[in-house]
Amino acid sequence: MANEHLATYLNDHLAGSVVAVELMDNLETAYAETPIANFVNGIRMEVEADQRELQELMSRLEISESRTRQVSAWLTEKLTELKLRLDDSAHGNLRLFESLEALSLGIEGKKSLWLALAAAAEISPQLRLLDYERLQARAEQQRGRVELKRIEIAKVALRG
C-alpha cells in the first residue's frame, strides 16, 4: 500500500509539473520577444530540470508514469488557459498576473514535494536518491523570483 501511495503522490506532482511547463510555454508564446518571455523561459528550464529529477526518481523506484494523470494534467492546463483568456483576452496584465500566481503556487507545491520526500527518506532508505535540500533551495529561489515578478505585475494589473 505504501508504494501505491508513493506512486500516486509522485505521479500527481509529475502531472503538476506538466501543467506548469504548458502554462509557461503559453506565456512565452503570448509575450514573445519581451522581457517576460525571457524571464519565463529561465524559470521553465529550471522547472523542466526538476521534472527530469522527479522522473529519474520514479524510474529508479520502478514507478511508471500514469498516462491518466498526464492527460488530466494536460486538460487542466487547457481549461486554465481558457479561463485566463476569458479573464483577459488581450494578453494583458491580469492574465500575466494570474498566470504568475498559478506558477508561484505550483512551485510552492514542488517545494512541499521535496520536503515530504526528505522526511520520508529519514525512515525509507530507498528514497535517499536525491539531494532534497538542494531541490528545496532551488524551489525557494524559483518562487522568490516568480513572486517578485508577480507583485510587480500586480501593481499594474490590480490598480483601481
Image (cartoon, helix red, strand yellow):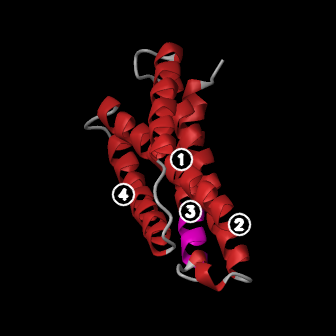
Name the amino acid, label 2. Ala
The answer to whether residue 90 is magenta is no
What secondary structure is the stretch in magenta mostly built from?
Answer: helix
Name the amino acid, label 3. Ala
On the image, numbered disc 3 is attached to which residue?
Answer: 139
Q: Marks 1/4: CA distance?
A: 15 Å
Q: Marks 2/3: CA distance?
A: 26 Å
Front: mark 3 or 1: 1
On the image, numbered disc 2 is attached to which residue?
Answer: 2
Question: Which numbered dot is residue 31?
Answer: none
On the image, numbered disc 4 is attached to which residue?
Answer: 45
Q: Position of residue 35 (x, y in %)?
A: 34, 43
On the image, numbered disc 1 is attached to which residue?
Answer: 16
- The residue shown at (73%, 75%) is 119
Residue 93 visible: no
Front: mark 4 or 2: 2
Q: Earlier in the sequence, mark 2 or mark 3?
A: 2
Q: Earlier in the sequence, mark 1 or mark 2?
A: 2
Front: mark 1 or 4: 1
Give, as a single range, the part of the protein colored magenta.
Answer: 133-141
Q: Earlier in the sequence, mark 4 or mark 2?
A: 2
Q: Marks 4/2: CA distance?
A: 32 Å
